[in-house]
Image: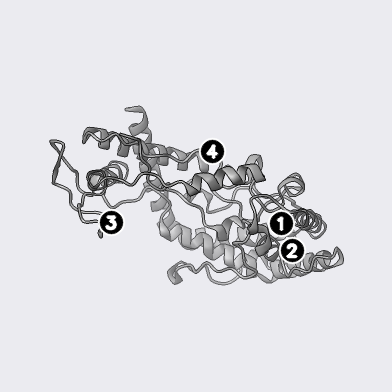
Amino acid sequence: MTVRRLAALFALGCAVLLLPGCSSSSPSASPSSSASTGASPQALDDLSGVPVLTDANHRAMPLDPYLLNPKQSRTISQASAALVSRCMRRLRFDYAQPAQSGDTTGIGADAPTTRMDGYFGFQTMAHAKTFGYHSEGASPQAGAQAGAAAGGQAPALTAGENTALTGTADPKRKNGPGGMTLNGRTVPDHGCVGEANRILTGSVTGSAGNPDFVVSLKFDTLAKGQQDPRTRAVFASWADCMQRKGHPYADPLAASGDARWSSGPAPTAEELRVAVADQECRHDTNVVGVWFTADFGYQQAAVKQYGARLDGVRRAMTDHLAAARKALTGS
């Protein structure tokens, strides 16, 4: 039987990545009200001590220890894929679950190593000159190949495979209690996906990914950092710079989110011109330094406010990663 695939387990929010066509001049992510970090941190009321930065991807942020980094995310994804595939083989289905691999950010060599996303957009002139606001490697040829792959329909799961994966024979339900017999074997609770979750987290409905609470904090601090008066002021200086270069955008989010950039698989000449001007104006006005400082302060305040709860998150993450490594190595 042909190996079949499910959708990848991990995806990145475009609001964080600032990829072409999915950004906005005002943050749209709505964090939980219980995760609000309150007012601007008093320790960062002015711009004294703000570092001069063109690239903050390799600067750690206070919330990083409470979110999976790329290496950890791959470990979890690979362990989950291995466990699901192993369970499916036990139920006598020829099925392999795909796992996350490589750089998921599109940033390439400059991608952060301490977190899964680049908060401040693409930050190097080399990227701007070659790819504009597109992901690294973007080209008409790559776009055509991706389009052809997307156009082809993967074979649908059989009813038996779906039941084995989810623990229910009801196509209207996402999962079920299992217990039925397939190929002489008993389907586990919530199917093979549930079994993988149980091994990694202790619960068939558990998730070894980033908890919603910390993700909400991340979006909350990101939104606050973007709307902070210091950030808005440096965005205004950046906008003046861009205006002088013939590119009227309100802020870097508006430039990277220009709908024209998402119309094709490769950057246009105009996109490259705008991206290069963006990098020049970021350099001249220290956009990244101020933006990073503001976001860092809000994250610092969040860690202080929710320290006990975040400590629990880190303990759970440690347990999940230990279970994942055991699933992959058998020890």
Q: Residue at x 40, y 42 (%)?
A: 318
Q: Nearer the viewer, residue 272 or 45?
A: 272
Distance, label 3 to label 4, CA atoms, is 29 Å
Mark number, residue 174: 3
| Numbered disc 3: secondary structure | loop
Q: Amino acid at mark 2?
A: Leu
Looking at the picture, how far across and down is residue 172, in whole percent? 25, 60
Mark with earlier residue (1, 2): 2
| Numbered disc 2: secondary structure | loop
Distance, label 2 to label 3, CA atoms, is 50 Å
Q: Amino acid at mark 3?
A: Lys
Q: Nearer the viewer, residue 257 or 321?
A: 257
Looking at the picture, how far across and down is residue 97, in whole percent? 36, 39
Establish if 6 lies above or below 233.
Answer: above
Residue behind mark 4? 102
Badge 2: how crowded within 10 Å, few (<14), some, or many (20+)? Answer: few
Mark with earlier residue (4, 1): 4
Residue behind mark 2? 47
Q: Nearer the viewer, mark 2 or mark 3?
A: 3
Q: Nearer the viewer, mark 4 or mark 1?
A: 4
